[in-house]
Amino acid sequence: MRLLYFAWLRAKIGTAEEEVALPSQVRDVNGLLLWLKSRGPGYAEALRDLKTVRVAVNQDYVGPEHPVRDGDEVAIFPPVTGG
């Protein structure tokens, strides 16, 4: 799975992107975010309040119940406003 991090999430986690092997217990976006929080202090800080995080899987905005699979591209970013 390819993970992409944007804005302050990237700064707190310390990388813009990474490739990870998806653990078998992770089946949806919520499970992925909870697993990522356990990967270290930068992840825990960045994902502390999941209400401030948005996710796109394969370039489509999705909710926490959306399934994830190996091979997906998952972008994690703060809410975006337009002007």
Image (cartoon, rainbow, N blue to C red):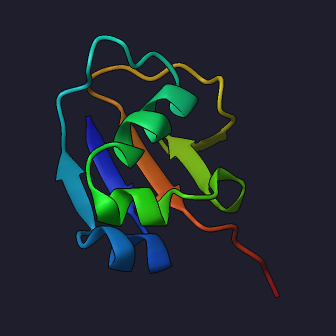
Place of residue 37 in the rendered image (x, y in percent of width and height, measured from the top left): 40, 47
Name above or below for residue 55 compared with residue 24: below
Specify the quadrant of the image occupied by residue 12.
bottom left
Specify the quadrant of the image occupied by residue 54.
bottom right
Q: Residue at x 53, y 19 (%)?
A: 67
Q: Residue furthest top?
A: 24
Could you tell me which quadrant the C terminus lies in?
A: bottom right
Q: Residue furthest bottom?
A: 83
Is 6 in front, or is 24? 24
Q: As drawn, is 8 to the left or to the right of 63?
A: left
Is 54 in front, or is 38? 38
Q: Residue at x 25, y 73 (%)?
A: 14
Q: Tally the marks.
A: 0
Place of residue 21 in the rendered image (x, y in percent of width and height, measured from the top left): 17, 28
Name above or below for residue 37 compared with residue 45: above
Q: Residue at x 47, y 37 (%)?
A: 34
Is 45 in front, or is 22? 45
Name above or below for residue 78 compared with residue 68: below
Q: Residue at x 19, y 53 (%)?
A: 18
Place of residue 19 in the rendered image (x, y in percent of width and height, measured from the top left): 17, 44
